Image (cartoon, helix red, strand yellow):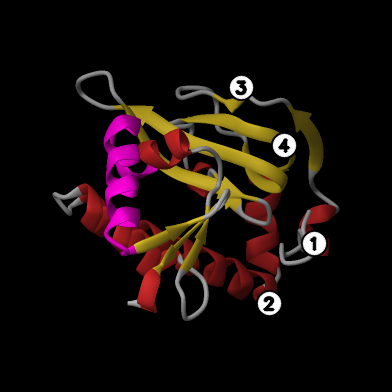
Amino acid sequence: MSAASPPLPKALAALAQQQSFAAGDRVFRAGAAARHVHFLVQGQVRLSRFGRQGEAVVIHAALAGEYFAEASLHSERYHCDAEVLQPALVASIPSSALRELLQRDAEFAMHWVAILSRQLRQTRARVERLSLKGAAERVRHLLLTEGKGLAHQYTLRGSVKDLAAELGLTHEALYRTLAAMEQQGVIERRATTITLRGGR
């Protein structure tokens, strides 16, 4: 885990079981019994489900230091697939034990509310982004909402193809859009980063 990634709280570390996954593995599949909430110690996991026309719809791309499948806390079954994009170490917390912890530990309960609030804001931003019609508008929105610093520098979470799925675009369309935006001087690209030139 990088130094910037928050650790698993001690209260949950005592309850969690850790397991390693290779790229391409599934932590769980849609329809499986939802018995755990998961914390990503390292790696990257993409949550997705199939749309009406059989297309993959990305719900969330979890990074190290993030929880995923929080909805399973009050659900009988998982409603999406959790695919490992980069070799991952996952800490799985039994949902029943987490519910008991929330009931008896008010300080941890507030910590959990803060986590859910942050991830809700991220989800709302993604919904807003997907409502934009143009590919360039989606890229710009991504940089403005998730880019770091005054330059709005965004670090890729995987490949450009992974980013295309997150933006609801084909990877061909995203490649063309990034090339055009770079040629126009709107963005600057490095191996793993995209920066909004001018910071706005």
Which quadrant holds the C terminus? bottom left
Residue 107, numbered label: 2
The mark nearer the N terminus, 2 or 1, is: 1
Confirm whether residue 124 shows in the render. no
Instruction: Specify few, some or many for label 4: CA neighbours under 10 Å numbering under 14, 14-19, or 20 or more.
Output: many
- Marker disc for residue 24: 3
Say if mark 4 contacts mark 1, CB within 8 Å: no
Residue 11's tag is 1
Q: Is residue 51 left or right of residue 96?
A: left
Tell me the amino acid under the disc marked 1: Ala
Query: Which circle marks residue 88 in the picture?
Result: 4
Q: CA distance from mark 4 to mark 3?
A: 10 Å
- Tell me the kind of residue under disc 2: Glu
Callout 3: SS: loop
Q: Main secondary structure of the magenta part?
A: helix
Q: Which quadrant of the structure image shows residue 79?
A: top left
Q: Position of residue 20 (x, y in %)?
A: 79, 31
- Decide: is 141 above or below 176: below
Q: Residues within 10 Å of mark 2 (few under 14, many from 20)?
A: few
Mark 3 touches mark 2? (CB < 8 Å): no
| Residue appearing at x 51%, y 71% in the figure | 148
Kindly state the secondary structure of the residue where label 1 is placed: helix
The answer to whether any part of residue 55 appears in the image is yes
In the rendered image, residue 150, in percent from the top left (x then y), is placed at 47, 81
Instruction: Return the disc, 4 or 3, that comes first in the chain's sequence.
Output: 3
The residues tagged by marks 2 and 4 sit, at their Cα atoms, a distance apart of 29 Å
Decide which of 109, 183 is in the foreground and name it. 183
The residues colored magenta run 166-186
